[in-house]
Image: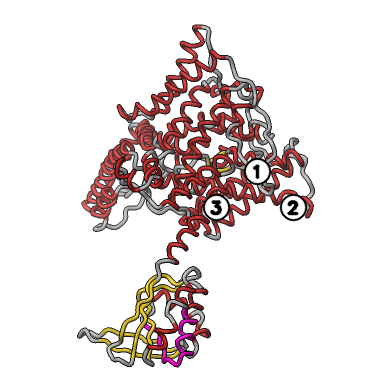
Amino acid sequence: MAHDDEQSVEITIDRTLTGTMTGIESIGTDTESASGTQKGMLRAPSKYSSDMNNNYTSSRQPITSEPSTSVDGETLMSHEQKDDKENPGANTNDIYQRITDWTNLNKLEMISGFVVSISSVPELIAAAILAGLPAYFGLTTAWIFCFVTSLMGGGRGLISGVTPAIAIALIGLMQSSGLGYVTYATLFASLFQFAFGILRIGKLLRLIPYPVMVGFLNSTALIIIFSQLMFFKDPNAFGQGQSRPYYEGSYHINAFASLVDGAWVSASTIIVMSIEAALTFAIALGLPRITKAIPSALVALIAITGLEWGVVRMVGYSGALVGDIANIETPIWPIPFFLSDSYILPPLNMDTFVKVLPTGLSVFFIAQMESLLVFKHIRSINQEGEFDANLVATSQGVGQFLASFCGGMAGSTSIAQSVILRECGGLSNSAPFFAAVFLFGISAGAYTAVSIVPLGYIVGINVFAAFNLVNWKDFMTILAALFPLQLRDRMYLDSKVNRFDTIIMLVVFTMTFFFDAAFAAVVGIVLAVFEYAWECSTRIEIEKEQGIHEESVSYRVKGNVFFATANKLIYGVSSESIAEDPREVIILMENAEVLDWTGMLALKSLHDRLHSSGKDVAISSLTPATKALMEKSSEMWSGVVFLEVQDLFDGESTVSSKKGFA
């Protein structure tokens, strides 16, 4: 019995400690939620709890879940088991506590997902109508996209949906061939996106320089502001856009279309919406300076909706509402496209493939570039560590496939909604998950509730997102780069950067605004690579040094040896200098890197040029990276003498030579 009593006590201690640790973990959970540093949908146990478990269980055998029995066959129960038997409501209280703790942990994610789900509805509906598709296609696409990307881990801080650039890419095929061909094109694009991630091509993200990001963000902010003008137009003016495919030179985004297309709403409605937009912007911008207890976007939503229905409409005026854009009949359930009566599916043959290929490639290119640019921006402002861009691409590809398969359309990452999500505190993968849940709720029947939200709020919150896209300090840097030195000194501008970087920024800004962000980014990257290659081509040096003995001389190469510096390396040593050199010549490469095939050929040409002049030539002090590259082409270096310098412990060194890399 004594042994049984001890075991019973052990059980009681274990259960008590478990309860204590649960309480400690709950406190940690509340603290972490308040600081907004949670990273995932679920939180792992704290280190403190783990240490306590290790300390109290390491010296005992594991306790099984079966109750211990005494010698006389009576069952011994822990205090917790007795409490559960005597008080059946204890389990209910425990479940309630766990739900409360989980809600406190994820409250910012839920609020941000709720705000974004409402603010994105007009954009989704307008983009679907622009492409010539039913309005509900935008809602279906958005919630499936967000659901898939969040579950796969590639949606942290990102909101996906239908963007104007994607809609424009679909217009031509929709007008000429119909919905079935558009679905095939989107499925085709999704396979490319999926392959992009699986093949780990997302590493290309590192090639996007800062001037490209500045031009993209500033131009996108301006586009967002101009696009809000469409909500001040008669909703009946919303219609399908004009065909502007990539493979034709006429492709562009007309940001000024809102100024000329359609009729404006009444003057009183414009005034009401402008006041509501201004109040929304003021609340979203100013409230966080007072308190961050509740997201300012949510406060603005409640305040402006209350103002519209409780004040404006009571005095005989009104502003436009979300429901005025389109009348969507709910519920809308995801149905595989081949089971829907809305589709007339073309045969799967080569003619169909040829028709959908250009649009599919356009959708893939736009969606991938937009997603990478938005991902890079969100990651930088969140000051996060390295995050897998390939996972983002893979999840976007799966989301693209499932959205089009289940009755949606092509989609991409929305930078405006992603910024709103971030400003509301949604930083983890659970934020887009909750956005997906709320968007699904809107599609399933809650559209009527969302339709009462004033469009003035939508305009104001999107302008707020555009305001946060702009890095205002960069404008002084741009001015400093454009002004001459004397004017910069007078204006005390000390933030000048390379003028070519400013040119790249302006080119990307202009192309994004008048053409497309994806093409603008590619052009900006090409210009940046050209600038880098040009700068490196001017920074290669060849220094002549007299050897220890008069019968030898060395040429020390400094800089990167590649296609842009090849000629300077080959002919950097004059014929007169070679003629005056002693017989032994060493090419020192310790301060140089050979980067490509052209660079290897240039080094080999310099060697052969010296050797043909009757010199005994050796190449010395190759860096590890250069040596690894040259060893792969060992046949090229057959007969070439390489010197290897090995340092000894007493500070002396030995030199050994060999021919080639065999």
Query: In the rendered image, which quarter is residue 130 located in?
Result: top right
Residue 82 or residue 652, whichever sits in front: 652
**Counting residues from the N terminus, which is met first, the one under dot 3 or under dot 1?**
1
Q: Compute the Cα span from label 2 to label 1.
A: 22 Å
Query: Residue 545, how many percent across, how many down?
Result: 32, 82
- Decide: is 225 above or below 520: above
Q: What span is in magenta?
A: 603-620
Residue 58 got which mark?
none
Q: Is residue 612 magenta?
A: yes
Secondary structure beneath label 3: helix
Residue 251 got which mark?
1
The residue under label 3 is 522
Q: Compute the Cα span from label 3 to label 1.
A: 16 Å
Does residue 301 appear left or right of residue 554 in this picture? right
The residue under the point 46% across, 84% down is 607
Q: For label 1, count other residues whose C-alpha is less than 10 Å away and answer few (under 14), some (14-19) or many (20+).
A: some
Does residue 286 appear left or right of residue 451 in this picture? left
Secondary structure beneath label 2: helix
Q: What type is the residue that disc 1 sits on?
A: Tyr
The residue under label 2 is 353
Q: Compute the Cα span from label 2 to label 3.
A: 26 Å
Q: What type is the residue that disc 2 sits on?
A: Phe
